Amino acid sequence: MSKRKGLQIPHRETRMPATDKASLRQLLRDECLPALAETAPYFSLVHVRAWLRDHDVGFAPALLREYLSGFMGDGVIHNAGRGWYSRLASPFTLSREPLAGLAEDLSRAFPLVGFSCWSTAQIKEAMHHLLSQFVIFVDVEVDAMETVWNHLREAGWDAWLNPRGQDAARFAVRERTLVVRRESRKSPSAEHFAPIEKLLVELYFEARDLQLMAMSDYHAMLANLAGTKRIQMATMLKYAGDRKLQPEALLGDPNPLTPPFEKRRL
């Protein structure tokens, strides 16, 4: 057996024995999926394939996908994005209440400007009082950043325009603190409220760059939030990839949310 970081996949010289349809379905339901779900709240199609191959089980890829889709329909496992599954039935619901007034104001003032916003207040239940004050982030298309920032300052916000370097070093969260950042071209939000998956990725960078919290506290928050309510793991990892953020850095080490990542596509 090869020893590589991640799942251990045996080397084989011959084809694995084929498994009949009924046996494969039963094996998935009774052994494979429970084993993966016991390991972590989320697992991927790659992890399922690796488990089957590690146990000398042959399978047809199309049939495997059909069975997994059926298990989602039956509530055995739950959808966590393309190619990802979860044992968690209840999805995370992101409250928009902390941002409703701000989004409405910006929509009126800049009807043609693309923007999305999020706040640390939206995930306060997962942080166990880690932050005593909260900060809002507004991601704006680059050409409108300064105009939006000026508007927010005039509206009474403690607004910061893309703080980096010395500005980031002196950044502090006060009453009505707000940060204007550039909206990502690769992963813009579809509406004015960032989804939880994008929030979690962006918070990683803000926690690091603005020292909002220690990275150990960030990873504890992420494990608490995503480990109790279901998020779209595939979407979060795509956001992270678009931002050149490796899964190991985002999820922490050790990573309590997924089985080890297999480097080779199975």
Image (tube, grey):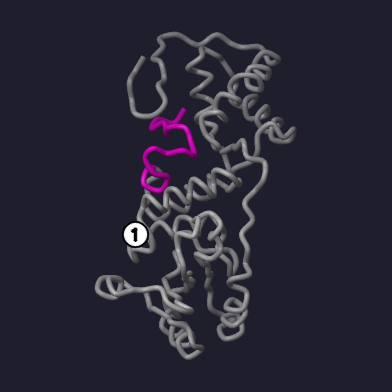
Answer above or below: position of 260 versus 28. Answer: below
Q: Which residue is farthest left?
A: 166
Please say whether residue 253 is one of the residues in the magenta stretch.
yes
For label 1, the residue is 208
- Residue 59 coordinates in the image, percent (x, y): 58, 18
Q: Which residue is nearer to you in this view: 214 or 145?
A: 214
- Residue 60 coordinates in the image, percent (x, y): 60, 21
Q: Dot 1: within a 10 Å radius of its alpha carbon, few (fewer than 14), some, or many (20 or more) residues? A: few
Q: Which residue is nearer to you in this view: 261 or 227?
A: 227
Tell me which secondary structure the magenta stretch mostly adopts.
loop
Q: Image point 62% across, 74% down: which residue?
A: 100
Q: Image point 58% across, 72% down: which residue?
A: 99
Q: Is residue 108 left or right of residue 245?
A: right
Tell me the quadrant of the picture where the N terminus can be found: top left
Q: Image point 63% across, 21% down: which residue?
A: 28
Residue 9, image quadrant = top left
Q: Image point 49% across, 39% down: which residue?
A: 257
Range covered by the magenta-colored residues: 248-266
Residue 185, image quadrant = bottom left
Secondary structure under badge 1? Answer: helix
The kind of residue on which mark 1 rests is Arg
Please say whether residue 105 is one of the residues in the magenta stretch.
no
Q: In this view, does 23 lie to the left or right of 241?
A: right
Answer above or below: position of 23 versus 168. Answer: above
Q: Which residue is farthest right?
A: 74
- Residue 221 coordinates in the image, percent (x, y): 47, 51
Q: How many marks?
A: 1
Q: In this view, does 206 lie to the left or right of 112?
A: left
Q: Which residue is nearer to you in this view: 218 or 151?
A: 218
Q: Which residue is farthest bottom?
A: 154
